[in-house]
Image: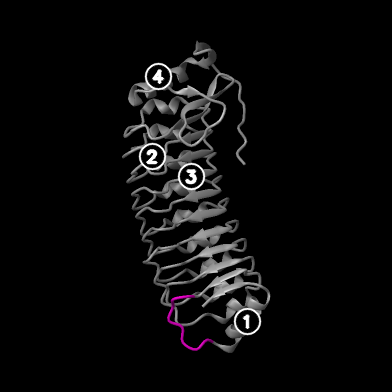
């Protein structure tokens, strides 16, 4: 749950469409309205499709520009110093300005379906950011500065063109959800083992991931690990340390065996081993699978 904080405005207010608003922020609204050829409604909350702003105590704390045909975000956006929510879904070919670094209060940034090809290094200056949704874009890499987002809890990178993660990903120690569905990742850095609060990690439909670092076993809070349709041939022994794991999806890889350390994973309620190249599994693994089934775990072979 995101709590919207209310700060007292720091400079003069001006009448604007029936409300009081900082003059510097009125200029931002007027500039955006010129770009999209539409008026921004003043609303109390955002729904899917909203084109408007949320204003509290004379300051814009929320901005939603849904499917507005934006390809350029004006530099003046950086004047919204109290902005906490920025939703830019379904805009084409957006290039983020460097002034985005001024948005120190921003907590939620959604750039889904924006045809983004890159992110500015300044993205790492968003020190209050809790949720970052970059799904359905054309990103091929992430800036190292993304590791500066120390408050980040949710990072959605589904359906991009990423082939690797930066080492700095391990600095996101507040992260609880990392979604990488539908990328082309072939390399996961050891630093991922620093994400000790993460609960959900998905490499679903990665297709190119052939190995996992031993440090994956450090993810003591991990509950959901999805590795469907990759090129894994072996799993690290350290995976047996993931004792909070409840869901493990290993289907459609090239696995021929399983480490016996997996027998430590006794909390699973879903285990998918389908479409691999398993030879005869060790008796300990067979007993483990049987015991899971007896406890009601859904096992797919």
SS under mark 4: helix
Distance between the alpha carbons at the discs numbered 2 and 1: 47 Å
Could you tell me what secondary structure mostly forms the magenta stretch?
Answer: loop
Residue bearing the label numbered 2:
90
- Looking at the image, is 120 positioned above or below residue 29? below
Gap between marks 2 and 4 measured at Cα: 21 Å
Q: Are the two marked residues, 2 and 4, in contact with CB atoms closer than 8 angstroms? A: no
Q: Which residues are magenta?
A: 274-281
Q: Residues within 10 Å of mark 2 (few under 14, many from 20)?
A: many
Residue occupying the far right of the picture: 295
Q: Which mark is residue 214?
A: none
Q: Which mark is residue 30?
A: 4
Mark found first going from the N terminus, 3 or 2: 2
If you read the primary sequence from the N terminus, does the residue marked by circle 1 or circle 4 appear first?
4
Q: Tell me how the rendering is colored.
A: one colour
- The answer to which of marks 3 and 4 sits earlier in the sequence is 4
Q: Is residue 28 magenta?
A: no
Please give the residue where the numbered disc 3 appears in the rendered image: 132
Query: Quick one: label 4, few (<14), some, or many (20+) residues within 10 Å?
Result: few
**Residue for badge 1:** 290
Which residue is at the far top? Answer: 15
At x 60%, y 80%, the residue is: 289
Q: Position of residue 104 (x, y in %)?
A: 51, 34
**Residue 120 horizontal side relative to residue 240, left or right:** left
Mark 2 or 4, nearer chain start:
4
Q: Residue 101: x, y in percent?
A: 44, 35
């Amino acid at each position: 749950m995101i709590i919207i904080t209310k700060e007292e405005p720091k400079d003069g207010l001006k009448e604007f469409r029936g409300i009081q608003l900082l003059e510097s922020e009125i200029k931002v609204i007027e500039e955006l309205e010129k770009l999209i050829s539409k008026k921004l409604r003043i609303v109390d909350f955002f729904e899917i499709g909203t084109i408007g702003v949320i204003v509290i105590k004379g300051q814009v704390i929320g901005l939603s520009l849904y499917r507005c045909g934006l390809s350029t975000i004006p530099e003046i956006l950086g004047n919204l110093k109290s902005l906490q929510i920025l939703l830019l879904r379904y805009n084409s070919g957006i290039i983020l300005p460097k002034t985005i670094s001024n948005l120190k209060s921003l907590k939620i940034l959604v750039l889904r379906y924006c045809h983004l090809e890159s992110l500015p290094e300044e993205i790492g200056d968003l020190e209050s950011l809790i949720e970052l949704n970059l799904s359905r874009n054309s990103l091929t890499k992430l800036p190292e500065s993304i590791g500066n987002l120390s408050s980040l809890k949710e990072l959605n990178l589904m359906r991009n063109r990423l082939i690797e993660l930066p080492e700095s990903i391990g600095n996101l120690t507040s992260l609880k959800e990392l979604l990488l569905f539908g990328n082309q990742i072939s390399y996961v850095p050891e630093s991922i083992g620093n994400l000790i609060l993460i609960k959900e990690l998905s490499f679903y439909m990665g297709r190119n991931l052939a190995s996992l670092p031993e440090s994956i076993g450090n993810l003591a809070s991990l509950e959901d690990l999805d590795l469907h349709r990759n090129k894994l041939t072996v799993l690290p022994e350290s995976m047996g340390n993931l004792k909070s794991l409840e869901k493990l999806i290993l289907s459609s890889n090239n696995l021929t065996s399983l480490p016996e350390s997996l027998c430590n994973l006794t909390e699973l309620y879903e285990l998918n081993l389908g479409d691999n190249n398993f030879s005869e599994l060790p008796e300990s693994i067979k007993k483990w699978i049987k015991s899971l089934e007896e406890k009601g775990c859904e096992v797919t072979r």
